[in-house]
Image (cartoon, helix red, strand yellow):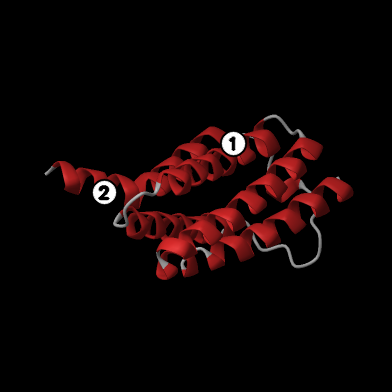
Amino acid sequence: MKEKIKNIFYLFFPIFMGFIIGLITKDSISYNDMIKPPFSPIPIVFPIAWSILYLLIGISYYLLKKEKDTKLESIIYYLQLFFNFTWPIIYFVFNFQILSIIWIIILLFLTIFMTYLFYQKNKLSAYLLIPYILWLIFATYLNIGTTILN
């Protein structure tokens, strides 16, 4: 039973935290009111994309946890989640635009490093993170673009 609870935690922790962050940031700066760079998606795309990505992140970590000796991978995993979950607060709640750019770039590098570490232990676990990396690259572009334009 304890193992099942752990597995559920690994799978759904990112989705749960994403939901909590959404509640925290929902009454903050409105993305709709910003001048956006080219190729900016409509707002409804973000919760859909992040829900899918959080699920992939959870599955990826769940698969990795089946391997032994994942201490460094776990530290990097939770560190990148910390950066992921605090970025919207920095950007939307506090409106610290320059800090948010630095923060998301650190998040991107942590995620790339995490993917590399996961690849060493479980290739599928790493492959599941590729959409996350691509989205973070796009989110970095949007973060820089909205900062310059606003």
Q: Residue at x 81, y 38 (%)?
A: 98
Q: Position of residue 86 (x, y in %)?
A: 59, 36
Inspect the image, locate mark 2, and give the three-letter code of the amino acid beneath it.
Ile
The label on residue 10 is none
Q: Quadrant of residue 85?
A: top right
Image side of residue 6 versus residue 42, left or right: left
Q: Residue at x 39, y 43 (%)?
A: 16
Q: Position of residue 112 (x, y in %)?
A: 61, 58
Q: Residue at x 68, y 42 (%)?
A: 30
Q: Position of residue 37 (x, y in %)?
A: 81, 60
Inspect the image, locate mark 1, and give the three-letter code of the amino acid beneath it.
Thr
Image side of residue 87 versus residue 66, left or right: right
Q: Which comes sooner in the sequence, label 1 or label 2? A: 2
Q: Residue at x 69, y 38 (%)?
A: 91
SS of the residue under disc 2: helix
Residue linked to disc 1: 86
Q: Quadrant of the N terminus?
A: top left
Residue linked to disc 2: 8
Image side of residue 134 versus residue 117, left or right: right
Are there few (<14), some (14-19), or many (20+) residues within 10 Å of tag 1?
some
- Residue 26 in view (yes/no): no
User: How far separated are the C-alphas under marks 1 and 2?
Assistant: 23 Å
Image side of residue 8 versus residue 88, left or right: left
Q: Position of residue 104 (x, y in %)?
A: 69, 46
SS of the residue under disc 1: helix
- Residue 148 in view (yes/no): yes
